[in-house]
Amino acid sequence: MIKQKCASTSGASLLIALFFLLLCAIVGSIVLTSASVASGRFANLKEVRQSYYSVSSASKLLKAELEGEKYSKYEILSKDGMPLENEYYALPQNKMKEFLIKAVEQVMTSQAEYSDIFTIHSSEQVIEEVTAYFSMDSQYNISIIVKQGSTKCIVTIPAVYSEHTETVLYEDSSKEEIDAIRITKTILWTEGEIT
């Protein structure tokens, strides 16, 4: 009888079954863990994509609004440099008209960079609100960083600046014609890019 119990392999079957069950439990927990991590990534992916689409749409809108805009102003100065008259030939005609005029006027007077921050939002909730960091350098080139969370795009719009000086006859308040200088300053924003 003892010889029979020693030769029996029925206990080994139980040990193999327990080992197999343990192996399946380990594999199952690994699969569940990786599935839950992947699920979290996909949930975050949706937010990241929405953020990208919002920033991308706002960047394209800004680029389209600013390309081809023109600012042109002339000043008439007396021979000794005293201002006599200011007049605009062309002003920006887009939704950012006042903003651009303010930026250009400040850069013209201070010869320093102008910067401001504003938000862009859609009334139809098509895009989520994004923040735009606007700057205009002393050469009137525009750079806008459009950002939402960690997603950002940079819109750059180069400017072409020209200045034309000519001597003119100016009729002053006493109806007397005097020699004067007319300085015409023109800025044209050309084709931009989004990076």
Image: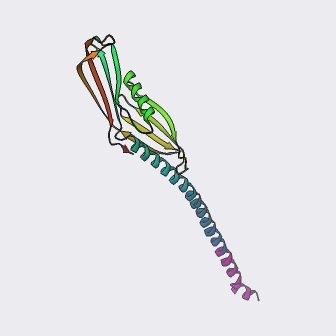
Hey, which quadrant is residue 18 in on the image? bottom right
Residue 5 on the magenta segment: yes
Q: Residue at the location (46% across, 49% down)?
A: 57
The residue nearer to you, when weighing 37 against 89, is: 89
Residue sticking out furthest to the right = 1
Q: Residue at the location (68% across, 80% down)?
A: 12
Image position of 116 (left or right of 177): right
Q: Quadrant of the N terminus?
A: bottom right
Hey, which quadrant is residue 77 in on the image? top left
Asked if residue 193 is positioned above or below residue 7 in the image, the reply reads: above
The residue nearer to you, when weighing 103 against 164, is: 164
Q: Quadrant of the C terminus?
A: top left
Image position of 119 (left or right of 61): right
The residue nearer to you, when weighing 29 against 63, is: 63
Residue sticking out furthest to the front = 175
Q: Position of residue 92 (x, y in %)?
A: 38, 35
- Residue stretch in magenta: 1-20
Residue 43 on the magenta segment: no
Q: Position of residue 90 (x, y in %)?
A: 34, 32
Asked if residue 113 is positioned above or below residue 77 in the image, the reply reads: below
| Magenta stretch: dominant secondary structure | helix
Q: Position of residue 104 (x, y in %)?
A: 39, 29
